[in-house]
Image (cartoon, rainbow, N blue to C red):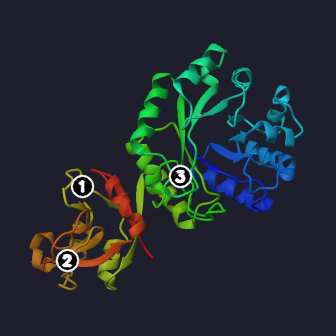
Amino acid sequence: MIGASVFLGQQEEHEQESYLDVISDLGGTTIFTSLHIPEDDSTLYKKALQTLGSQVQSRGMELYVDISTHSMTTLGLQWEESRTLLDWGVSGIRMDYGIESAVIADISHYMPVALNASTLTPEWLEELFALGLVKNHAEMWHNYYPRPETGLDAAWFDKQNRFFKEKGLKTVAFIPGDGQLRGPLYKGLPTLEDHRNLSPLASYLSLVNNHPVDGILIGDPSLSLSSVNQFKAYQNNEILLRYESFIDVSQTDSLLRLNHRNRFDPARDVIRSEGARPFAQQLGEPIRARNQIARAKGAITVDNELYGRYQGELQIAKTSLIENEAVNVVGQVIKDDLPLLDFIEAGHRFSLKRV
């Protein structure tokens, strides 16, 4: 599951709909919103929530709402009337801020409840089960953390998630966005502190590959167009790497524009494009030596004519390497995309986009 956060009243209605379309196109299934953010005007919540619920429902997605007793009162509802939220397009409730256990257990009988995975103790979970919490209507959602240095420790996060898995419960975490960031701090909204300064796709792949959860939500209000394009490429089983060019030569550019695949016998130090060398041979032109400099991690290289039959091989350095007179350094993967190199494994497809 992938999804996104929409903060009520932060966008015009048409902008909100456009973003929902983007998330839906990326395969998004879940939208999250919060009703107890202190910086927001709570008097606007009811109409805004109903509008969002209608928009989400019309796209076949689910809407989860982070809610408290105070925000229920603001909506003009008591907990006994929480079924009304279903009529507004709300699919489930994330429950926090001192809500009574009996209330949580009761609501789980007619709608999904998301509990705070970052603070829920084994004792409280057992109490909820004893009160009748419906397991297949319960999920464990971690917090996002606006303030730098307060995001979760990865080892503790994994331990907590293993506990919930043993109990048969799904887990959900947040990754930062890179379009419009959420105020008042504008420092990203990740669950893991390790992800605060990573790109959305790198954070997503980190969770998928290293810290498995059942659902991943973008915490901040939007994604940049570059990130949207990277997620679209990933939908097609391809990792899109952005790079800066060092050499402006049509021969080299044609190699860079290929759809690449890392060889099925992966090298330790470099990612090797299996199709670049045969393509270069078809061009029938020698690749002259130029810009043979030391290679930093992320350096994009093309072997020149001095490498004999390897001429035209395109590589990306996975670590720092010394200069080689037979290797032209033609570009550099941008800093934000360097973490993506770790996820290009044997046989994985990748493409290069000049910035």
Q: Which residue is mark 3?
A: 190
The quarter holding residue 210 reads top left
The quadrant of the image that shows the C terminus is: bottom left
Quadrant in the rendering for residue 339: bottom left
- Identify the residue at horizontal 47%, vertical 57% (top origin): 233
Residue 24, given in percent of the width and then of the height, sits at: 64, 50
Secondary structure under tag 2 reads loop
For the residue labelled by badge 1, is the local secondary structure a helix, a strand or a loop? Answer: loop
Few, some or many C-alpha atoms within 10 Å of disc 3 (few <14, some 14-19, many ≥20)? Answer: many
Q: Is residue 308 left or right of residue 343?
A: left
Marks 1 and 2, the one that precedes in the sequence: 1
Q: Earlier in the sequence, mark 3 or mark 2?
A: 3
Q: Is residue 212 visible?
A: no
Please report the residue visible at 14 percent of the width from the left and 69 percent of the height from the top.
310
Residue type at mark 3: give it.
Answer: Pro
Label number found at residue 294: 2
Mark 1 residue crowding within 10 angstroms, few (<14) / some (14–19) / many (20+): some
Q: Which marked residue is nearer to the observer: mark 1 or mark 2?
A: 2
> Residue 258 vs residue 229: left or right?
left
Rendered location of residue 43, percent (x, y):
87, 51
Marks 3 and 2 sit apart, C-alpha to C-alpha, by: 35 Å
**The N terminus sits in image quarter:** top right
Question: Gap in Å between the C-alphas at discs 1 and 3?
Answer: 33 Å
Instruction: Please state which amino acid type lies under the numbered disc 1.
Output: Arg
Q: Nearer the viewer, residue 136 or 70?
A: 70
